[in-house]
Image (cartoon, rainbow, N blue to C red):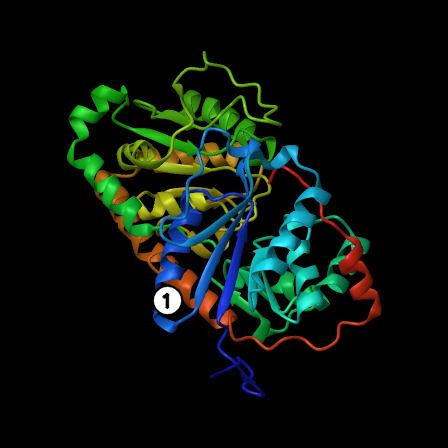
Amino acid sequence: MKYSARKKEVVAKPDHIAVIWQRFLPYHHARIRRLSESLTQQGIRLTAIEVASRDASYGFISSSSADSTNSFCCFPDRTYHELTAREINTRVYAILMSLAPDVVFAPATPFPEGMAAVRYRLASGARVVIMDDAWEWTDQRGRLTEIVKKTIHKNVDAAFVPAPSHFPYYRKLGFSDERVFFGVDAVDNEYFSQRADSARGRETRLRQALRLPNNYFLFVGRFLPRKGIDTLLTAYDQYRKQVSGNPWDLVLVGDKAGPGCGIAYSDQQAGVRFAGPLIGDELCQFYGLASAMIVPGLRDQWGLVVNEAMASGLPVIVSRGVGAAQTLVREGENGWTFAPGDSEELADLMRRMTRLSAKQKEAMGRQSEKIISEWSLDRFVDGANKALFVERREYAGLLSNIMTRLWKGWVRVN
């Protein structure tokens, strides 16, 4: 038996927990593995539930089993965004009722799998922790939406979010201090650090094989308008016109043909190279040989590429529209931030980065590694373990119960 955060009631150790994600991407696998190791030591069983094995947003990434962890895919060989909200909600709810976990970690309530978990809580008496990284800047849908979410969240026991920077948003949605836990957005820092170092150890051969310049800014992400690609390309054009000496190149990693792309990308823009979609060791080579990372998102809930770049030892330039900027970027120490959509400010920071000496860039990179070490998989496991023992909320009220049963969530490109 263990005590909850408030220590008012004794909360029994759960026997079985379930973790749900839309699709198991590499960083999900890493979190599941580390969490499973911790729970096994405590005698707690973990079931990992994947909604669909394909996702239109990440079409180039193939899903795989969650290693030795007990895992289940609701819609094998189906694409998440081709399913209806009702299909997802119904299937996930049925699986949860069959598995009967004591605690469920699930995506936020706008998603059908998240609402299925909350509906399961209502029917079973289990507890639910939503894993979310929204904040004020990314959720501006008005007062009515806020009221609806706050009402439904009366049936949610806790929120597992990235960092304290996101807490004010969840306080507004009705979560008290003892019901919010941190560390949900973590990557395997050791993996990225080791692979980046390995790439640097083979630098000459790799640069020739990959046709990479000696210095380049790196962008990694989907080519969605909200990711700020237009801002980046405009800023880079300004940078090349204004910088003295040899300008750095710009390497773009991602799928420019993905759904909702909407980016007028030109293969002819001077200094810009499109590398295509990359994952795993191939991606780490580009991190390892880059000079700096740029994350120009207009509205981004967190931005895991910031974690990856910092774990790879890179200085970073990050838009303040990216949630990670508040926590992970320390001005002038490991990089800089800029106003979302401001290409002139970004171009100025690119020039400033170019003017740094090799020693200064290395120092910034080391500082990135030091900062991100505080936001590792261990932080994810620590936050999840704390959330396991949160007290179940009292009766949410008739209106919240009705909304929980009726709202099925909606499918979207996340």
- Whether residue 300 can be seen here: yes
The relative height of residue 414 versus residue 387 in the rendered view (above or below) is above
Query: In percent of the image, x 34 and y 43: which residue is there?
Result: 315
Residue 114 position, x and y percent, is: 64, 54
The relative height of residue 308 versus residue 47 in the rendered view (above or below) is above
Residue type at mark 1: give it: Thr
- Taking the image as shown, residue 64 lies to the left or right of residue 232, namely left
Disc 1 crowd rating (10 Å Cα; few below 14, some 14-19, many 20+) is few
Instruction: Classify residue 201 by image quadrant.
Output: top left
Query: In percent of the image, x 27 and y 19: which residue is there?
Result: 211
Residue 110 position, x and y percent, is: 69, 50
Query: In percent of the image, x 30 and y 33: which residue is there?
Result: 290
Nearer to the camera, 66 or 264: 66
**Looking at the figure, which quarter contains the C terminus?**
top right
Tag 1 residue: 40
Residue 215 position, x and y percent, is: 29, 28
Nearer to the camera, 352 or 219: 219
- Whether residue 131 can be seen here: no
